[in-house]
């Protein structure tokens, strides 16, 4: 530092304060501000995941929960959508925001939900009630993988099975019809996967829905055995019918 600069420095900060002290303090303050901003922006303990196969109405529901409408329609995406927002139905502006995450249904990217597994408080699993039967096996496989994931099992994450497109009238299968068909598919998957793991010497119990020797699989039996609650609801994300049931589930998982 030149003599003139040194004299100016001492006149401002005194002779006992060195430049590196000031630089260190500034860096420390910047680091603290950054840590606080990250901590405030991170959606700890308030994430709701919207899962399900492609075309089941996930993004439509995502917009419906956020805006109370479907905007101008939706387009299938290969990237997750995420927003931290109050629900459109929240009556108080002071309500606790919810972090909604819409996960694409394509098999190559649908496991990206694992990036939010630690902050997730609940899962909305969407099913197309009109186009259900041709895809029931694939739907059951995806649901099976969710139900047996260690994060879901260990934390007993609540799940709401939403049978979408109820506005299609008789073309849409009922909630009971879909639930019973899925229970049969899940029971079959459990038997098949357990047999394959037994042949391969794997630990079948680790990916079973119910303990060995248990009765035929049902969602009620799952809750009794593991504590994982899987509720059901009929809704139309497009028209808004039944979305109140989804909002109530969200607010039970993330209280306002």
Image (cartoon, rainbow, N blue to C red):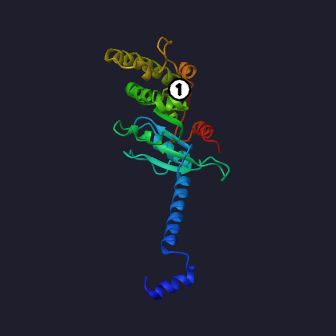
Quadrant for residue 249, please give it. top right
Looking at this view, is 19 or 155 the one in front?
A: 19
Q: Quadrant of the C terminus?
A: top right
Residue carrying label 1 = 175
Residue 126, position as x, y percentages in the image: 48, 34
The residue tagged with tag 1: helix, strand or loop? helix
* Rendered position, 50 above or below 130: below
User: Badge 1, how many Cα within 10 Å: few under 14, some, many 20+?
Assistant: some
Looking at this view, is 119 or 65 the one in front?
A: 119
Quadrant for residue 122, please give it. top right
Residue 254, position as x, y percentages in the image: 60, 41
The residue most toward the front is: 16
Q: At x 54% / y 50%, what residue is drawn?
A: 84
The residue most toward the bottom is: 4
Q: At x 46% / y 39%, what residue is drawn?
A: 57
Q: At x 52% / y 36%, what residue is drawn?
A: 123
């Amino acid at each position: 530092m030149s003599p003139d600069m040194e004299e100016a420095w001492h006149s401002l900060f005194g002779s006992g304060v060195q430049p590196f002290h000031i630089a260190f303090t500034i860096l420390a303050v910047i680091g603290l501000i950054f840590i606080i901003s990250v901590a405030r922006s991170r959606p700890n303990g308030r994430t709701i995941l919207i899962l399900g196969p492609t075309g089941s109405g996930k993004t439509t529901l995502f917009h419906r929960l956020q805006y109370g409408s479907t905007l101008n329609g939706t387009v299938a995406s290969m990237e997750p959508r995420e927003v931290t927002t109050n629900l459109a139905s929240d009556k108080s502006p002071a309500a606790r925001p919810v972090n909604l995450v819409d996960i694409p249904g394509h098999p190559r990217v649908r496991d990206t939900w694992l990036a939010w597994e630690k902050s997730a408080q609940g899962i909305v699993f969407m099913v197309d009630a009109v186009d259900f039967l041709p895809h029931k096996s694939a739907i059951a496989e995806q649901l099976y993988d969710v139900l047996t994931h260690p994060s879901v099992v260990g934390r007993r994450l609540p799940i709401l099975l939403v049978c979408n497109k109820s506005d299609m009238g008789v073309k849409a299968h009922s909630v009971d019809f879909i639930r019973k068909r899925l229970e049969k598919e899940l029971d079959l998957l459990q038997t098949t996967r357990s047999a394959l793991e037994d042949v391969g010497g794997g630990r079948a119990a680790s990916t079973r829905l119910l303990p060995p020797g248990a009765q035929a699989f049902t969602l009620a039996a799952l809750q009794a055995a593991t504590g994982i609650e899987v509720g059901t609801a009929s809704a139309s994300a497009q028209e808004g019918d039944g979305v109140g049931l989804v909002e109530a589930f969200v607010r039970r998982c993330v209280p306002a």
